[in-house]
Image: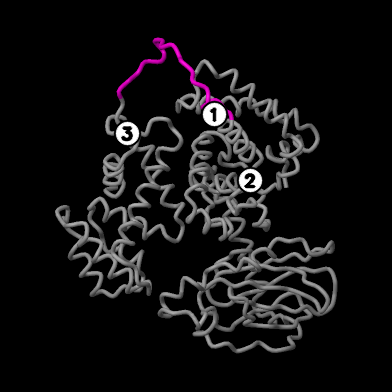
Amino acid sequence: MSYNGNQQDVKLLREEPRELIIKYQDLIQIIVKKYIASKMFHSSDYEDVVQAVNEDLLGKLEKIREQYNGIALLKTYFSAIVRNSCLKIYDKRKKDIRVFPLGDEDPIVEETATQNLAIEYDLERLKRIFKYYHKKKEKVILCVKLYFRLRVNKGDVIACFPDCSEEDVLAFLGHFGTHYEEMDSKEVYRIVTLLLNNYEGKSNTVDAVRNWSEVRIREIIQLLNGKRRESSYDKESLRILTEKYFSI
Amino acid sequence: MTQVNVMKLFDENLHLNEEGVAHYVDALKLNTLEQLPEPVLEHVSECATCRLNIEELFLLLEKEVGKPGEQHSIFRLKPNLESLNRSIFYRIAAVLLVGLGLYGITRFGLPRRDQGKIEGSTQNVPPSSVGIDSSSKGTAKSLLSDNYAISPELEALIGVHYRSSDIEVESPMVGEIIHGKIEFKWVWAEKGKVILKIINNKGKEVALVQSSEHGYEFSGTLERGLYYWRIETADELLYVGKFLVE
């Protein structure tokens, strides 16, 4: 096997860990800058935060060396540690009340999610978010479509319920395969619950299914927003995003 | 593909630790999610905290780690045809075709290879009961998902280094999805009989075979689901793996 970059870094971790931190300075700086861009830190704190991260890393070098099992790429693993370091620094600083002067480079701008959707980028994010749900992915997609009253197709139903009879598929599409924006939420979930219970062999209540959908929607919004101080996504902007996603 | 000790990816609270999160992010970037251990995939599908951690780390590293072409010790990377030099690709394909052709010519007409004495018995377990806990409520169809549930006890045995004299398993690979016959193959420097056991995800032994050779072809019928398999001698365990039957 050729000696690739990761192997070189692992060797450095084992033999000269301080040199590894020096090598990864660019990575540390990039991560701190990204947190500044997300407003977790102020731009004037950049050097302080980088220094604090480096001090934190130096303090736990031995622990990093012991705990790394060679499963993930070292750079990714190291990034996870730097990330946690930044979060720790942020938590510590949150307690301080600080005032930042406004300059030309830091204007206050009224931003709304609908004005600033970076659509293509967020479509990729949504695709990745669905993957996180693994075997529940199809069920999550179906619930998202129903939640936002988007048209359901046969593929959605079969992906969720592979053993669904043709009759049930047609009946389901009869309700949700066309426009149903005006349908009462209770009715939507009543029909979905019937199908779920029938093909999953469970006895969910309508409220339970509705709550399950609601929680998934909130999770997706939370994933899209991350730890940014301002929330970019809300239900309305997620609806716009999912409309775009499923129309492609 | 190197086996992964799944427990090393979780912390004491049974969430993904830093390396677990990093491993998932590696898989996302290299488009090898399906090669992640099932317990990891299952946990992330259930855990909002771990999903958040993964998504955030992924976004931090979007243009950084895991660029195409970088080797990974765990994942088999899929070839990116767009970036491959086409002439090199066609040359490799040509060599492989010629090689396959020669292999077919030399193979044709040779007597079927003896896979060694097979002693002991293969328990005939009816397909309908394999992998299904008949005491559970619900229809057989609805319990199909139970057939894929991992067994934490058996998962913990996968990837563990049992002996200094290594047994090298050629097939099936950990987590491999199998249709039809199952070819068990391994290389082991020592001579002597080994016992091969196939166990369903409920811990029930569904096949037991003794073999003095380094392979066994299982042609019985297994219900769709997750199975574990063990190679052991009379004295010790040599290997634990798992595969999925579809």
Q: Secondary structure at mark 2?
A: helix
Residue at mark 3 shares a chain with residue at mark 2:
no
Q: Chain of mark 3?
A: A
Q: Is residue A133 left or right of residue A195?
A: right
Between circles 1 and 2, the one closer to the viewer is 1
Q: Which residues are magenta?
A: A89-110
For residue A117, the mark is 3
Amino acid of disc 3 = Leu
Amino acid of disc 1 = Tyr
- Residue A225 shows in this picture: yes
Q: Which residue is mark 1?
A: A90
Q: Which residue is mark 2?
A: B19
Task: Tell whether label 2 touches label 3 (CB within 8 Å).
Answer: no
Q: Secondary structure at mark 3?
A: loop
Residue A246: x, y in percent?
29, 50
**Magenta part, dominant SS:** loop
Task: Tell me, yes or no, whether the highlighted magenta stretch contains residue A13.
Answer: no
Residue A33: x, y in percent?
52, 24
Amino acid of disc 2 = Glu
Q: Is residue A98 above or below residue A226?
A: above
Q: Is residue B152 above or below residue A105?
A: below
> Gap between marks 3 and 1, in whole Å?
27 Å
Residue drawn at x 42%, y 43% as measured from the top left: A223
Residue A157: x, y in percent?
30, 64
Q: Is residue B80 left or right of residue B103?
A: left
Residue at mark 1 shares a chain with residue at mark 2:
no
- Of labels 3 and 1, earlier in sequence is 1
Task: Tell whether label 1 touches label 3 (CB within 8 Å).
Answer: no
Task: Tell me, yes or no, whether the highlighted magenta stretch contains residue A101.
Answer: yes
Image quadrant assignment for residue A9: top right
Q: Is residue B123 left or right of residue A46?
A: right
